[in-house]
C-alpha cells in the first residue's frame, strides 16, 4: 500500500535528516582534491531545503488536486535524495588512494586544458570496466526544475575504473576514452557531429531505418537513440587518440582483446569499426608511420564485414544491424569535430619521436624516464604524455632491454608501472617548481 501524504512526509523527513547528517560528516573529512568538499556540501544544503518543505503542514481546506500535487512533489524530493546518495559512493572512494595520485593529477590537468574549471572524481568499482557517469548533469536537471536553488558544482566528471586493475598503471591510459565522454557532455560533440552531417543525411538515415525496420516507429526511435550513443563512443575513442596516442590505443586493444572480439555489443559500435577509426586517427597524427609501424606494435585491423539484416533476426539484432549501416555516414563528421576541438593541442608522433630513444635508454637502465640533462647541466622534464607512451611502447616491444635480467612478464609489467608513476611525479614536481 502506498504511503498516505502524512506518512510520505515523514519518510521524506527521515531521508532528509539522514542525508544531512551523513554528508555533514563526509564534508569534514580531508579529501585529496579541495573541491570535493564543495561537492559534499551540496547534499547538506539540499537536505535542509527538503526538510523544510517536508515539515510544512498542509494548508487548511486543501482540496484533492492540491494534495495530489504536494504528494507528487514530496515523492520527487524523496527520489532526488536517493539519487544524491550515489554521489557519496564517489566521494568516499576518492578518500582512498584507489588510483595512483600522479595519474589522477595528470587526468585532472589534461581535462582543465579543454574544460575550464573541470573537476574529476575517480572511484574503483567491482565492475570490470572503465566508465564515465553523467551523474552530475542528471542530478542538476531535476534540481533546477525543483526550484530549490541548489546544484552540484559543474563541470564535474565522475569516472569509474575496475578495482581489479587498480595497480596496473599502464592500463589506466584507457581513462582517456572516459575523458572523451566528459568532453562530449561539456562541448556537445555528438550533437555537433549530427549538425555537421546535416539534415539531409539525417532524413536519409531515418528513411533507410524505416525501410530496414518495416516502419516500426518504436524500433526506429530505438535505433536513432542507439545511433546517437554510438557516435558518442566514437568521438570518445577519437578524443582518446588525441590525448594519449598509441598508449591509449594499445591499452584499449589489450583490455578489450580486440583481436579476439570482432563483434559488437548493444551499447558500443563494432570493435573492428572502432579499431579502424583509431587506426586512421593514429595515422592522421603521424603515429603509424613514425612510431608504430616501424616497431611492429600495431597489427593490421581485419576488415569489418558489412552488416546484413536477416529476416529471422530478433528486433534487437535488427536494430543493431540497421544502426551499423547508418553510423558509417557520420564517421567523417566525427573526425572533423574532434580534430577541431583539439586543434593545436593534440599529442602527435612528431612530439614524441625526438625524445623516444632517450626515454627508452632510461627505462632499459631501470631509471624513471622523467627528465633529461641539457648541455649546460640543467634538466628539463618530459611531458606526461611522452612518459606514458614511452612506457607503453617499451612494453609493446617486449621490454627488450630487460631480457638479461630474467624478469617474468608480471614482474616487468609491475616494474614498468612503478617507473612510470615515479617519472610522472618527478616531472609534475619539476613543472610546478618551474
Image (cartoon, helix red, strand yellow):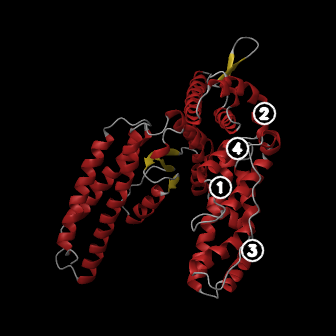
Q: Nearer the viewer, residue 67 or 186?
A: 186
**Horizontal relation, residue 300 to residue 122: left or right:** right
Task: Please report whichever mark, 1 or 2, sits nearer to the chain's N-terminal start.
Answer: 1
- How busy is the neighbourhood of tag 4: few (under 14 within 10 Å), some, or many (20 plus)? many
Whether residue 76 can be seen here? yes
Distance from the alpha carbon under mark 4 to that under mark 2: 12 Å
Question: From the viewer's perspective, is the residue at label 1 or at label 2 nearer?
Answer: 1
**Residue 258: which disc?**
1
Residue in the picture at 60% in, 76% down? 317
Q: From the image, tell me which residue sits under label 3.
A: 201
Residue 194, percent across and down?
69, 67
Residue 208, percent across and down?
71, 81
Quadrant of the image for the C terminus? Answer: top right
Vertical placement of 414 versus 43: above or below? above
Distance from the alpha carbon under mark 3 to that under mark 4: 31 Å
| Labels 4 and 2 touching (C-beta < 8 A) | no
**Residue 245: which disc?**
4
**Residue 353: which disc?**
2
Amino acid at each position: 500500500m502506498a504511503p498516505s501524504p502524512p506518512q510520505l512526509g515523514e519518510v521524506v523527513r527521515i531521508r532528509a535528516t539522514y542525508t544531512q547528517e551523513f554528508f555533514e560528516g563526509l564534508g569534514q573529512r580531508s579529501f585529496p582534491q579541495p573541491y570535493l568538499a564543495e561537492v559534499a556540501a551540496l547534499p547538506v544544503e539540499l537536505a535542509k531545503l527538503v526538510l523544510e518543505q517536508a515539515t510544512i503542514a498542509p494548508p487548511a481546506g486543501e482540496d484533492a488536486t492540491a494534495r495530489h500535487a504536494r504528494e507528487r512533489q514530496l515523492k520527487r524530493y524523496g527520489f532526488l535524495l536517493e539519487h544524491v546518495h550515489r554521489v557519496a559512493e564517489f566521494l568516499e572512494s576518492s578518500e582512498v588512494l584507489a588510483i595512483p595520485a600522479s595519474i589522477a593529477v595528470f587526468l585532472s590537468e589534461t581535462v582543465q586544458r579543454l574544460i575550464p574549471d573541470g573537476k574529476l572524481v575517480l572511484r574503483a568499482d567491482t565492475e570490470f570496466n572503465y566508465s564515465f557517469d553523467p551523474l552530475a548533469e542528471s542530478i542538476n536537471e531535476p534540481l533546477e526544475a525543483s526550484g530549490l536553488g541548489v546544484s552540484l558544482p559543474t563541470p564535474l566528471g565522475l569516472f569509474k575504473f575496475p578495482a581489479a586493475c587498480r595497480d596496473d598503471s599502464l592500463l589506466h591510459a584507457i581513462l582517456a576514452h572516459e575523458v572523451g565522454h566528459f568532453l562530449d557532455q561539456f562541448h556537445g560533440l555528438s550533437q555537433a557531429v549530427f549538425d555537421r552531417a546535416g539534415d539531409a543525411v539525417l532524413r536519409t538515415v531515418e528513411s533507410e531505418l524505416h525501410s530496414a525496420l518495416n516502419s516500426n516507429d518504436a524500433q526506429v526511435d530505438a535505433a536513432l537513440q542507439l545511433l546517437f550513443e554510438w557516435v558518442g563512443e566514437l568521438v570518445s575513442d577519437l578524443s582518446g587518440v588525441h590525448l594519449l596516442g598509441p598508449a591509449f590505443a594499445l591499452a584499449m586493444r589489450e583490455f578489450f582483446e580486440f583481436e579476439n572480439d570482432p563483434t559488437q555489443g548493444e551499447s558500443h559500435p563494432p570493435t573492428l569499426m572502432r579499431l579502424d577509426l583509431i587506426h586512421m586517427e593514429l595515422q592522421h597524427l603521424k603515429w603509424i608511420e613514425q612510431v608504430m609501424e616501424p616497431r611492429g606494435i600495431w597489427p593490421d585491423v581485419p576488415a569489418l564485414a558489412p552488416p546484413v539484416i536477416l529476416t529471422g533476426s530478433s528486433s534487437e539484432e535488427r536494430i543493431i544491424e540497421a544502426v551499423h549501416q547508418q553510423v558509417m555516414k557520420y564517421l567523417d563528421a566525427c573526425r572533423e569535430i574532434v580534430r577541431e576541438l583539439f586543434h593545436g593541442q593534440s599529442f602527435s608522433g612528431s612530439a614524441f619521436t625526438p625524445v623516444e630513444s632517450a626515454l627508452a635508454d632510461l627505462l632499459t637502465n631501470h631509471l624513471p624516464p622523467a627528465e633529461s640533462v641539457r648541455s649546460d647541466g640543467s634538466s628539463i622534464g618530459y611531458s606526461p604524455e611522452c612518459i606514458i607512451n614511452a612506457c607503453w611502447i617499451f612494453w609493446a616491444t617486449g621490454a627488450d632491454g630487460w631480457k638479461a635480467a630474467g624478469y617474468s612478464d608480471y614482474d616487468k609489467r609491475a616494474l614498468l608501472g612503478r617507473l612510470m608513476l615515479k617519472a610522472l611525479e618527478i616531472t609534475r614536481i619539476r613543472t610546478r617548481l618551474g
